[in-house]
Amino acid sequence: MQQFDLVIHNATGLHARPARVFVDIAKQYQSTIQVRHGAKQANAKSLISLLQLGVSSGQLIHIDITGVDEESAALALVSAVREGLGEGPAEQVVTTPVVVAAGVSIMEAVVPAVSVGYTAATATLKPETARTIRGVAGAPGIAVGPIYQFKRSQVVINETSAGATLEQARLQAALESARQQLAELREQVLQRGGEDEAAIFEVHRDILSDPMLLDSAEMAIAEGESAARAWQAVINQQAAQMAKLPDPLLSERAADVRDAGERVLRLLTGNKLAPLPQSDIPVIVVAYDLTPSETVALDPQRVLGFCTAVGGPNAHTAILARALGLPAVVSAGTAILELAEGTPIILDGNSGIVEVEPPERIVAAAQLARQEEQARKLAAAERAHAPAITGDGHRVEVVANIGGLTDASQANRSGAEGVGLLRTEFLFLNRSEAPTEEEQFGLYKEIAQALDGKPVIVRTLDIGGDKPIPYLNLPAEENPFLGQRGIRLCLQHPELFRQQLRAILRASAFGKLRIMFPMVADEVEMRSARAMVEEERAALGLSPVEVGIMIEVPSAALMAEELAREADFFSIGTNDLTQYTLAMDRTNPTLATRADGLHPAVLRLIARTVEGAHRAGKWVGVCGELGSDAMAIPILLGLGIDELSVSTPAIPVVKAQIRSLTLADCKERAQQALKCATAAQVRAGG
Ligand code: PEP
Ligand code: MG
């Protein structure tokens, strides 16, 4: 038996994403793995039971492992926990400012706002209504219209048991159909949203395979319950327990257990989902809560936005609303449910405020603000495929940050002029062995082809730090963000690195691929890595590819002139550059508003990088989140940035903003910003 204690260091504790990584690793071993936290105990292979431990950041868990592969299981879990259980950039959707529309950041959308006004548009209005209901901003945007009170039809169970064997078979069949539906929903969200949001339905599929749920339901069936009653009781009990957890990130997952569970229950009983509004007048949906499935089903032609009495900004419903571009206010309280059907409201998803029966003047102003916002988006979308050229004739390339094949096709359809950053980690994480060269080659080739000959910058593996990779058996580190990560780690594991390089080089025959190394700190690293590219390329007898580096370590920015002699291009990773310049952990929610890439210190490093590169005749892009920040774009252009690599939905808006600027004004703005003392001053316009 292996027994040991581990401290969970993840900023938000053992919440859904790290718990899922933990469970996925545990499931790869035959041994029985129990996790204890205080008086509670969980099966490590059950996501639900693990979440119910309610482990917060800095807390201890005790692990008992018994079985044939107990030693390797222990090693894998220890290293995964120490390396942060998959917590990385994708988690920052709620902790780091990420611009989703001109001037509106996700941060503004998820932090309970105290300010009042229609921030997404030009008008700034004070509420002057008889009733203002304050909730929490769930997804940005303004909606004006009558409400539709959404009432979920209750599931009615009439069935009694037809015998344990038959009931077990019915449950299995319903589970299988539900998993099938979830796979389809995932596809739908992939098309409308993104890979991260679609993962919500993967979590639901995991829930439906959770051994704790299945075992409890089977036991109840064996004791004489019908499949429907057994399943309902188990779901209710587990969701109720989860809802009691003090950590909101964990308690919000109760909604996912209910949603996934109810899907099976409706299949078992033939009760269909509640009908959604059918009227021709678009409405704002008001509900006690909406499940992720119900949210995805909202037809954007008929639904202007939604407001829920409960729920939180981190719940999957709000995350989905942001991905689908649906304005939302959550946690508005039950007063919202007492409004009569058809009551006119203004829903402000930027500030979390609902105005009930607002005066005509306010409605008109809000409608104007909304129309302007929509007109801007529409105009931007219409010209998404046109180049981004400033008023005085300066062209800036706008390319996409992607994390997989689906993203690649979407980027190509949305006007991306190429891919500025392909994060290849998706191929390496959450698995028990490294992907083969063939597997990698196949994917890089498909991505190259999806971009129709446009350039694709493939960033080599950027793991270590916060991203666990159990099959490398990496030793635990005190400060993983300052340890073996990025290019350092690849140079330490040349076989892994060379395999990836060969796969990229081979795929480069099918498109225009470029190679980029992450976390380069000096020219020695750059030269060693580049030499390996050359050796592999020569051995394969292929044509040369361009090789660039990310500038995300302050030393690289300071040495840009020297590095520019070695590299074909630079791309500034402002997420890490900001973290390392300001010594502020990019994953720490309490530092989210202060770890601002518009800090003059970061801007001075960007300026120095551009100077060094341009002197050597090399181009510079920005692929961190700052590249889609509406406040930062003029400054970045003014500092001489040649290319912006942003998330796919931001491409049309970023291009539109560039067209509204002149390079001369941007240069002036950049010079002012460099003289500021703080990021706040830069944001205030100097
Ligand atoms: C960055 O650091 O800005 C960057 C783009 O890389 P990642 O977010 O993947 O670390
Ligand atoms: Mg980085």
Image (cartoon, rainbow, N blue to C red):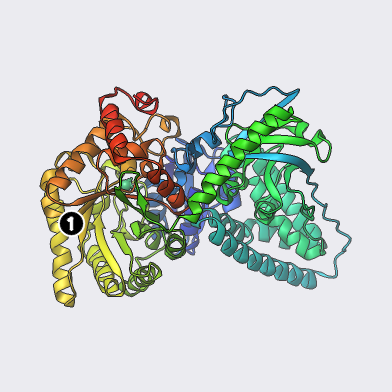
Q: Residue at x 30, y 50 (%)?
A: 395
Judge left or right: residue 575 versus residue 497.
right
Indicate whether 184 appears above or below 564: below
- Quadrant position of the C terminus in the picture: top left
User: Residue 357 is drawn in which quadrant?
Assistant: top right
Indicate whether 284 appears above or below 382: above
Q: Residue at x 76, y 60 (%)?
A: 265
Q: Position of residue 423 (x, y in %)?
A: 36, 56
Q: Position of residue 489 (x, y in %)?
A: 24, 54
User: Residue 602 is drawn in which quadrant?
Assistant: top left
Nearer-the-camera pick, 239 or 591: 591
User: Residue 422 is drawn in which quadrant?
Assistant: bottom left
Q: Residue furthest bottom?
A: 541
For label 1, the SS is loop
Indicate whether 573 appears above or below 498: above
Total labels: the figure holds: 1
The residue singled out by tag 1 in the image is: 568
Q: Position of residue 681 (x, y in %)?
A: 36, 23
Q: Residue furthest front?
A: 392
Which amino acid type corresponds to the residue marked 1 in the rendered image? Asp
Judge left or right: residue 101 versus residue 682.
right
Q: Position of residue 551 (x, y in %)?
A: 24, 46
